[in-house]
Image (tube, rainbow, N blue to C red):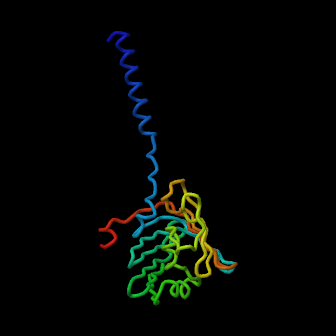
Amino acid sequence: MSARSFLAALAGAAALLLLVSGCASLTPAPVPPPPRDALAAFSLEGRFALNHEAKSYSGRISWTYRPNTSELLLSSPFGQGLAEIVTDADGARLTGSDGRIRTAPDAETLTREVLGYPLPLKQLADWVRGRTPPGSGRLDPLGRVLSLQQDGWQIDYGYGDDAPGSPPMRIIARQGEHVELRVFVDAWHSLSPEEAHP
């Protein structure tokens, strides 16, 4: 092989190497969240922090919500399951990390009795989606709810972009001075009709 051919081959290999390494270093574009109107049934992954009467709790939340059922998994910050709460037409069931199952007529009663603090799961399904009773919320210029008051709770919102239909990515709910629940959504998923009615 001549020197010229060798240099040409070397240049070609270098160009190919740069192309491959450049493609490998490209990160996929972030997937935008589904619009709020598409979240009749949803799943989300995120984090929560709860302050209740001078006690603090935090961890991860994995929630699948359908109009007639709700499956919510609370985990430690390191991913260890703490409690799974399932609600349906028969009531609410909580399975603890020890495998014990507790039941109650609704999730609020159940979490108060077992965890020591009430989680407003019935309202929270609407709150996390930014759904408000007519005339009850303060909206931003894009028509998205910024804050609302309901059933003694003050709820404030934050968003991840400027799209008018975006769902909230940060929800802060306060009840008086003793209860504050923060939910930070990392990922939204809109359930298909098949997923919503398995």
Q: Is residue 49 visible?
A: no
Q: Nearer the viewer, residue 158 or 91?
A: 158
Residue in view at x 46 percent, y 87 percent: 102
| Among the 4 quarters of the image, the one containing residue 103 | bottom left
> How far across and how far down the image is residue 92, in percent?
44, 85
Residue in view at x 53 percent, y 74 percent: 134
Name above or below for residue 141 compared with residue 149: above
Q: Nearer the viewer, residue 96 or 172?
A: 172
Question: For the image shown, how many numbered marks are present on the structure?
Answer: 0
Residue in view at x 39 percent, y 74 percent: 66
Would you say 169 lies left or right of 66 here?
right
Q: Nearer the viewer, residue 7 or 136?
A: 136
> How far across and how far down the image is residue 41, in percent?
39, 70
Residue in view at x 44 percent, y 35 percent: 22
The quarter of the rendered structure image containing the N terminus is: top left
| Among the 4 quarters of the image, the one containing residue 67 | bottom left
Q: Is residue 41 visible?
A: yes
Instruction: State the residue lying farthest toward the front.
Output: 135
> How far across and how far down the image is residue 124, in percent?
52, 75
> How far across and how far down the image is residue 175, in percent?
64, 78
The quarter of the rendered structure image containing the C terminus is: bottom left
Would you say 154 lies left or right of 12 here?
right
Would you say 189 lies left or right of 138 here?
left
